[in-house]
Image (cartoon, coloured by chain):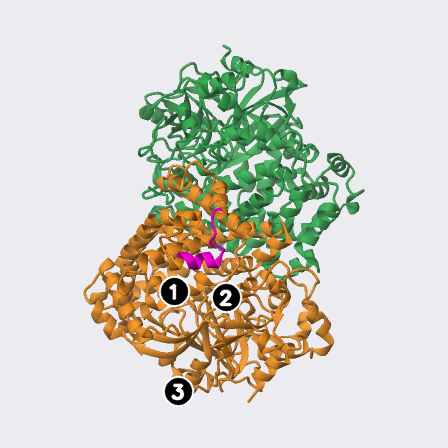
Chain colours: A orange, B green
Amino acid sequence: MRRFVLAITALTFSTAHADEGMWLFNDFPSAQVKQALGTAPDEKWLEKVRLGSIRLAGGCSASFVGSHGLVMTNHHCIRGCLEDLSSPERDLLAKGFYAATVEKEEKCPKIEANQLVAITDVTQAVLEATQGAEGAAYKAKLKEISAQLESACTKGDAKSRCDVVTLFNGAKFHLYQYRRFQDVRLVFAPEFDAAAFGGDPDNFNFPRYAFDASFLRVYEGDQPRPTPEHLKWSSTAAKENDPVYVSGHPGGTERALTVAQLEFNRDVALPWNLLRLAELRGRLDEWMKTSPEHYRVGQSKLRAVENALKALRGRHQAVGAKGFVEGKREEEAKLFAAAPEKTKGAWAAISTATDTRRALWAEFRMLEGAEAFASDLFAHARRLTRYAAEKDKPNGERLPEYSDSQLPQLKQWVLGKAPISKDLEKVMLTWSLTRLQELFGADDPFVKQVLGKKAPSQLAAQLVDGSKLDDADFRKEVMERPGKVEETDAMLVFAKKVDAASREIRKKMEDEHDAVVKKNGELLAQARRAVYGTTGYPDATFTLRLSYGQVKGWDKVKPLTKVSGLYERATGADPFKLADSWVKAKSRLKSDTPFNMTSTNDIIGGNSGSPLVNKNGEVVGLIFDGNLPSLAGNFGYDGRDNRAVSVHGEIITEALSKVYGAQRIVDELKAR
Amino acid sequence: MRRFVLAITALTFSTAHADEGMWLFNDFPSAQVKQALGTAPDEKWLEKVRLGSIRLAGGCSASFVGSHGLVMTNHHCIRGCLEDLSSPERDLLAKGFYAATVEKEEKCPKIEANQLVAITDVTQAVLEATQGAEGAAYKAKLKEISAQLESACTKGDAKSRCDVVTLFNGAKFHLYQYRRFQDVRLVFAPEFDAAAFGGDPDNFNFPRYAFDASFLRVYEGDQPRPTPEHLKWSSTAAKENDPVYVSGHPGGTERALTVAQLEFNRDVALPWNLLRLAELRGRLDEWMKTSPEHYRVGQSKLRAVENALKALRGRHQAVGAKGFVEGKREEEAKLFAAAPEKTKGAWAAISTATDTRRALWAEFRMLEGAEAFASDLFAHARRLTRYAAEKDKPNGERLPEYSDSQLPQLKQWVLGKAPISKDLEKVMLTWSLTRLQELFGADDPFVKQVLGKKAPSQLAAQLVDGSKLDDADFRKEVMERPGKVEETDAMLVFAKKVDAASREIRKKMEDEHDAVVKKNGELLAQARRAVYGTTGYPDATFTLRLSYGQVKGWDKVKPLTKVSGLYERATGADPFKLADSWVKAKSRLKSDTPFNMTSTNDIIGGNSGSPLVNKNGEVVGLIFDGNLPSLAGNFGYDGRDNRAVSVHGEIITEALSKVYGAQRIVDELKAR
């Protein structure tokens, strides 16, 4: 009856299960897929789907679905844009948006879209440049060669974005070249109540009835960008057992963690994050009840917090499930016994580095992770402070997020017009400074330096009220004329004051943990290759991957829901309240149109907004979630119950047409 | 620099460390103590201190410190009473209270004080009655014999309270007979800012400057109860290295847990509780900011939540510390190998029962633990509903909390005049119903039965507004005339509706987990005795224990703070704001009077309010806290850094006299 306790009984890691894998486009196991599904992509198929796939730099996936830059993604991927374009009088998050003509499409201040145009294997160059280096020296060498390769790739073109990507824990390095689009406009978004129908209770659950879809358009030179490479809309509806693929950007997995690292996750990192999120949810939810305007400005943050809380709770249950770590321990012992001699030191090295991480964790997260300064104004202040300090250094010596290839995105963040609520800033900053004092204690020298004789609420009010960083013009001035105006802004002064301590703990973590794990992770990858004889797929890295599978339910859960179920589930009470437009459209909709759908594809956070395509590479759905058992996906995939959840292609076109009167989008989707 | 990560490196369990132990008064290791401290209590000393010790049934300790019923305990132990006696116009929690004459002392509606007058070993009787029984049958037999023994002991006298206490996991059973006092009146309480100076940041930290003291008086027949057996106030101040004893009621420890049980704590129970508390803290704190009245009525609950959150976080860190469980696993393997054959099945049986507990946990906590119905009105409704259902059953067949020996306390709860804030009720109930829906899912049959088509906030408002259970007279009517008025009260109807499901999961948990663990815990205790040859001290059970130790700091922390430090630490900002009375009294106080003090005594939650006594059995301090390393104390004691924290006796009398002008209390304390 209760589905709360995840049943994770026999995940193994050494060999991939059927339908497991977030595969590289340039190393796709077509033969294996052919055997599993009776069909498989060829090179042409792979190129077409790759070019039709889009990454949203903020952490989502998307796809080109029309010949003039039309992009499909999730509603929950563009909540930030909806808030940024809203005001107290115009609540786009609640009410939705539809530009009846191209001219009425509105620019999203912070969205950057990337299209992957080329992948180059640069393993050789990186290994040569880093050979023999350890710890801090390794990190410096890797940073230097990466910056060199990325610069040579972009050639100073702001429309080009190049990233060196570490794969297989450092056994391979690929250079990903993207076309960068920073003029991305809002075309359509449904009401919050339609997109997030079922809210937190239904999140990660199924049966499900969420219309979590939205459309954007990519512009260049103030014109819709021609995109003949877009994905076609399937004229055939996906049904149970159909082979389906997900092309998208899984954000990160940790399927090759050692036991020491799993224990660290279980006992330190996950509880830390969960406690923070739980308290934040309580705060935001109560604070949002204090006024309609507070509700409006807090809404998107609260939903993100609820989603993360549920996802990480599932992950914590997975790694804390009875026997999970013990099984992994036995497997590790076997691999260790069979591993090549020169790789055997890796486990102990990673374990020691993980001990270091335990010791540094609280300080690292509070200072460099800015958890002690949970404020958008602070984030701006830190960016500007560090930009001023980094920009004149040689490219390879800067903090990586200030290297040439990252500057266009940095500038978009700094100069974007997204509004900041000073009321919410004070709630967040008061809370985070309180946590600092609580976790480090009142006698801690850093706490004394930061708070002096002030209470957290007093300091927060002073910093927020004393800052003009909510004004994009002021930020522009600071960025362009560093050193001129900083002393006049309380938050800039504060960010500068805490920067040395933050950089210090970051350097310590990078040198004594990150670099050691990267270097030794490479040895582990070698050991795995030597023993199991296959490379498989690398851990997710928020780069483009292809997952294969089938439309399938699990246990007694059927894979497809229908429009009729939506109307049955509606109660009139939040979060099961139907949007008015759907109430009115009831008689116009076919009651058996498929609504949401589950499939066996191996996905994870970052895949939100990915197109679900059929064997012809045509769109049949829109990924937006996973089921509860999929929350174990960070550590491993179990095809018995791990399911991806998508909006069915049929309800997308039918609702656009019959609920929203957005026929011009349907026409673009269906154009041949 | 950072003290956040607890250093727990080498706790062992098999043999007691110096100063370890929460010893039974009738099995005190005087010879061992004599060797450690050069002094030790004799029988007369033990009897005197036992009779001077008091248990507050709500979960604290206390002591008689005057010849006419004067009781000393912590301020944080009587916060509930201060709130109960407060109103919007009269905030005793914030402002404190002092009855200048005996006539002005005010009755605390919910406080019950118990004085331990006799201990009888009833092991033989219990073992005979339960012989051969397993699971549910064992539970029933144990309940029956316990109720029999308790009834025979109280003889129907409401002033007598008798409890059968399970010790050493069921290897021994003692019958504790208490004198019960239900007329307990408030004599003195300082301001919140003085009692909780340093607030959450200083909680479990040291150096410390909390005046966490209060005084009550026990009445009988409307007159102060004569208490010639009270503890004397020491005329000599405690100083570093002095031998000291704590006589009090540690609430519970789990020092004999098996690995399976420790893992359950680490992976399920502690994270569950921590997440709940963290979210509750966020909610309460933000809600309390919405009005001064909300701040007033939420204050005591918030402090309790913060305290529990910090304590359990420390406990979680202890059991999740690197190597902790592994060390325990090795020890368990050794004990298993050496254990008598007939006890070897116990580990597997406990492990299987713990798997069952994992599976039942969420449902058990939400329903029978009432976490889905977090409301004082619901608590009243459940008590009344169950009282009506249980009261006519034979004593031995009732739920234990409705057995004859428990009824006086039950009646005090039901009929007490403690006010209930309907605003706060709605916040709590909305939240807890939301958690129910979130954790079980909207499709869960129980969730559907409870919520129907309502949102949690709608149901909460309906139940709270539709209940008169905040009126003690109405509760009295329901209790005395069951079956007559229940249908008129929404909360009573609701409590009845969910009672069957709650009882069902409770029975399952008791039969399939609790009874198995109790029965097999007995075998483990036998194994330990056979291998280590000593009984040691039993796990804490909220019964009277004596702990020995010395006034000592740890690391670089000195054991005593002084009045001058309080004034240096004050910032003017909450929670480091000095109470006005202390600001005004500064020149009257000696700057080197000892304020707070650490000692090596092995204590835990429940010990709050215990007297700290010297080798002569005279009061030298008042226990109110432990340090951060002491939070590991649930699982084991490490004398290197585990410290108890008390208010020094000297500041108690000096502040009563010079800050509060409460000379009549000082005179009572010092009377010879």
Is residue A104 depicted above or below B603 in this figure?
below
Q: Are dots 1 and 3 in contact, CB under 8 Å?
A: no
Cα distance, mark 1 to mark 3?
A: 29 Å
**Could you say where residue B112 lies in the image, as x and y percent from the top left?**
61, 29
- The magenta-colored residue range is A466-478
Nearest the viewer among B369 and A591 is A591
Nearest the viewer among B325 and A160 is A160
Among numbered discs 2 and 1, the one appearing first in the sequence: 2
In the image, is residue A1 part of the stretch drawn in magenta? no
Q: Residue B631 carries which label?
A: none
Q: Are dots 2 and 3 in contact, CB under 8 Å?
A: no
Q: Residue A254 carries which label?
A: 1
Among numbered discs 2 and 3, the one appearing first in the sequence: 3
In the orientation shown, which residue stands out farthest toward the left? A132
Cα distance, mark 2 to mark 1?
A: 33 Å
- The residue indicated by pointer 2 is A109
- A400 left or right of A304 in image: left
Q: Nearer the viewer, mark 1 or mark 3?
A: 3
Q: Residue at x 70, y 48 (%)?
A: B495
- The residue indicated by pointer 3 is A43
